[in-house]
Image (spheres, rainbow, N blue to C red):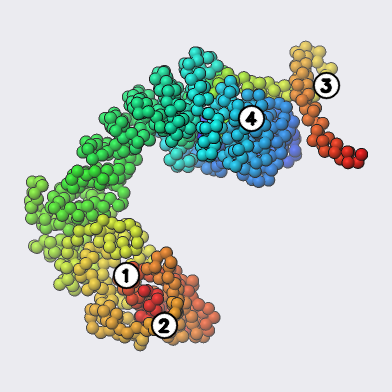
Amino acid sequence: MPAPIRLRELIRTIRTARTQAEEREMIQKECAAIRSSFREEDNTYRCRNVAKLLYMHMLGYPAHFGQLECLKLIASQKFTDKRIGYLGAMLLLDERQDVHLLMTNCIKNDLNHSTQYVQGLALCTLGCMGSSEMCRDLAGEVEKLLKTSNSYLRKKAALCAVHVIRKVPELMEMFLPATKNLLNEKNHGVLHTSVVLLTEMCERSPDMLAHFRKNEKLVPQLVRILKNLIMSGYSPEHDVSGISDPFLQVRILRLLRILGRNDDDSSEAMNDILAQVATNTETSKNVGNAILYETVLTIMDIKSESGLRVLAINILGRFLLNNDKNIRYVALTSLLKTVQTDHNAVQRHRSTIVDCLKDLDVSIKRRAMELSFALVNGNNIRGMMKELLYFLDSCEPEFKADCASGIFLAAEKYAPSKRWHIDTIMRVLTTAGSYVRDDAVPNLIQLITNSVEMHAYTVQRLYKAILGDYSQQPLVQVAAWCIGEYGDLLVSGQCEEEEPIQVTEDEVLDILESVLISNMSTSVTRGYALTAIMKLSTRFTCTVNRIKKVVSIYGSSIDVELQQRAVEYNALFKKYDHMRSALLERMPVMEKVTTNGPTEIVQTNGETEPAPLETKPPPSGPQPTSQANDLLDLLGGNDITPVIPTAPTSKPASAGGELLDLLGDISLTGAPAAAPAPASVPQVAQPPFLLDGLSSQPLFNDITTGIPSITAYSKNGLKIEFTFERSNTNPSVTVITIQASNSTELDMTDFVFQAAVPKTFQLQLLSPSSSVVPAFNTGTITQVIKVLNPQKQQLRMRIKLTYNHKGSAMQDLAEVNNFPPQSWQ
Amino acid sequence: MIQAILVFNNHGKPRLVRFYQRFPEEIQQQIVRETFHLVLKRDDNICNFLEGGSLIGGPDYKLIYRHYATLYFVFCVDSSESELGILDLIQVFVETLDKCFENVCELDLIFHMDKVHYILQEVVMGGMVLETNMNEIVAQIEAQNRLEKSEVSAQLVCLMPLPISPQGGLSAAPARAVSAVKNINLPEIPRNINIGDLNIKVPNLSQFV
């Protein structure tokens, strides 16, 4: 077999590839060669092959088959082999246990090797990828190396110890004795890594922190080192742009921060040196600013003197004016951190911060935006909002959502007046309407309803806002809602806040209709518009016929949601005209949304009006989401006109609702298509108060122990049993498991169980275990129903069963009203 | 802690990929791509910090990068590192590369991927800064390269029958190699005498006595 090509040649070949496919082909060919070379246990070229694999790995090709070869290289005697082997191990090895076990041995040998570079490699690898088992096994060796006099090994051992502590925190104590002399070291590399190790220990364990503060007197030691660094003249060894080892200074300042945090004595001990660093550091270059920045952070974090804190914030203020974007960025970041504690000091730089909103750099802009929001308070809200609204107008799309919700929050917290609040939110909706979060619409609607005296003003403003531009969906939704609700105020022209405008009823309807027609409108927006038009039928006097026409046109809309609404509204006109005004009454002032408990759903039905629509899957979804649907389906005939709106839209929570209650409605329309009612269910004749009728019936609830199961249905060989469970976490949820069995001699196929409950309940039907009820009681179908009964009312249910039996389709309805009281009380 | 160090060129071709946290290979490549796209769309005159991408870390992580001619050097770090400090560190790393390769260019990184890794190993270890003194780094790298070279020439000595040497040019090399071999092998000798075993044997013997 010829010698494998060199890495250099491979790279050269790969670079000639003109397409990705060509490259892949070359690599595959080479991989095949490498594999066969590996199989032959070729020792001479193993290192070359692994190097090639690493190159391919970097390009994103799989190279894990080289893992074991890396181990073999590590075990080799040659430094060249070990070097590439360890590199391969760090890049290729994953968490596989067996490989790690082999590794542990090799590393252990190499940690005791006589060549420092081999030891260094082993330390480096352990410090990069050592698993917790490896760390446990090798911590002793690391600790030994931490005490050597060889600085090359010592610095690596210190970082390795950090890794060990991260992996196995309980090994920390082991390194404690070795830390004693670390800070006396002259070599800066060792000093640097020692500070890292000490930082890690202090951060991980409060005991260690206390120990280093009190017993080891770490602060004076660090202060001394820092002082030497600033005072010592030019040392070519450690000089970076005129500053002596800025990296070490930064590290020490970080450790001082941890030591001084919440500790008066330590903070006291470092005040002077911090002041010295803050005033003496040369800031013409990035390195100087890095130190200064770190100093500022330390001053802000420890219990420093107030004068020092002012100095620190002023340094940040100076940073904000710096030409270097990076400096400006860190200044904003750190001001953001300190704004909570030193609010007033930061407030002084407000104008500079606001200026940063106009920066071209997105990172700076984002920070400036966050900081600006943090600076908003009751005194400056008007000015700040002006700036932020201007920013919202001009900023990149990626900021708009955050900025808009920031403005909403700030406005809610500090709004000087309701009118200002409404104006501000409307401004946001007009400028960044499509970026606001979904909850903005209901929130604004709630705000508007609650400020009764502003209704006329608001509706007028909104009308004007959508007159020219109805592309901003949230704005149009709010506007449609308000026009529907307060349309009478709009046409009457009685607005005290502003010059009233003269609008006719037809003009209002024109705009709503154009929203309905516009292809920019989403389905949700159209729903709002249609409902608004419907509401206007009781608020406007001379355009009712026009409204009827619009509603009936949308009765055949291809948008199912819209169609359903239109059909429902149409029915309202035709059959329940006497109830229309009560149903479409103005919404009552809403309570602030409470955010827990199932009762909330009931309370907020009205105000969160759009929510169920927005989250609703397309109407064709398999799981009907509303009980009204179920029940209407249940009673099945196509000749029944559904009257109840499926979503709780447009229905005032208070009035009329019960009148139109589902069950009542059903018996009103006579349900002629329904299959003959089972004998056990009394056919209630008198409309429309079926519900009342039901509740006055005597119920079989004399079973008292546990929650007994009931037989809900037993007819034609089909028997359905209900068993109950009550949820512990939420007692208003009853979980009903139904079991259907079949005592006839033939299977019942395509079995579908449906259920409906009165309006005060909510029902969730989970999918059944099967659709076939096997004959001779040889098996059952189970299906789980969850009923939410927030008001703990008497549970009633209508069920509908469809199945195929003996070649014919069967359908039956039943009413279940013998629920044991334990299941709902 | 530094989570990852990525170097890629202006077209997104990776030139150095080093992760200090374990990610599956596919994710690593995705991170490189994502980082490239994040960095690419930024002008040279805006700040060098980026809030982390979606794949690596979270809000605590930042991408800190510098752009040199055809190459981007990107460090992904968490909040325990100083942003400005990392910028200086990138500078130190690049200057070190420059010293080791003498006017480093992209081609050096391409053809000496292993060497670049070795240099990086002397600067950053396990995601933490190890050494920032360039002279020290270069000295250690050179010493290790010498060690490698001596092994190669030692191998040459073994492969070549000695009598060929009269041609002059080669005669010096074996001499150096031999001394290198000596240097390497001498310390090996005590390791072969297994002290651990001896220690165990002694008490065994005493038992018999």
Which residue is identified by label 3? B161
Say which element carries label 2: loop
**Quadrant placement of the N terminus of chain A:** top right
Disc 4 marks a residue whose amino acid type is Leu
Closer to the eye: label 4 or 1: 4
Q: Considering only vertical position in the picture, is A428 above or below A161?
A: below
Disc 1 marks a residue whose amino acid type is Gln
Tags 1 and 2 both on a single chain: yes
Depth order, front residue of A94/A137? A137
Which residue is identified by label 1? A791
Mark 1 or mark 2: which comes first in sequence?
2
Are there few (<14), some (14-19), or many (20+) residues within 10 Å of tag 1? some
* Spatial CA span between label 3 and label 2: 106 Å
Disc 3 marks a residue whose amino acid type is Pro
* Spatial CA span between label 3 and label 4: 45 Å
Say left or right for A570 vs B92. Answer: left
Tags 3 and 2 both on a single chain: no
Quadrant of the rendered image containing residue A601: bottom left
Q: Are marks 2 and 4 in contact (CB under 8 Å)?
A: no
Say left or right for A32 vs B103. Answer: right
Are there few (<14), some (14-19), or many (20+) residues within 10 Å of tag 4? many
**Quadrant placement of the C terminus of chain A:** bottom left
Depth order, front residue of A213/A520? A213
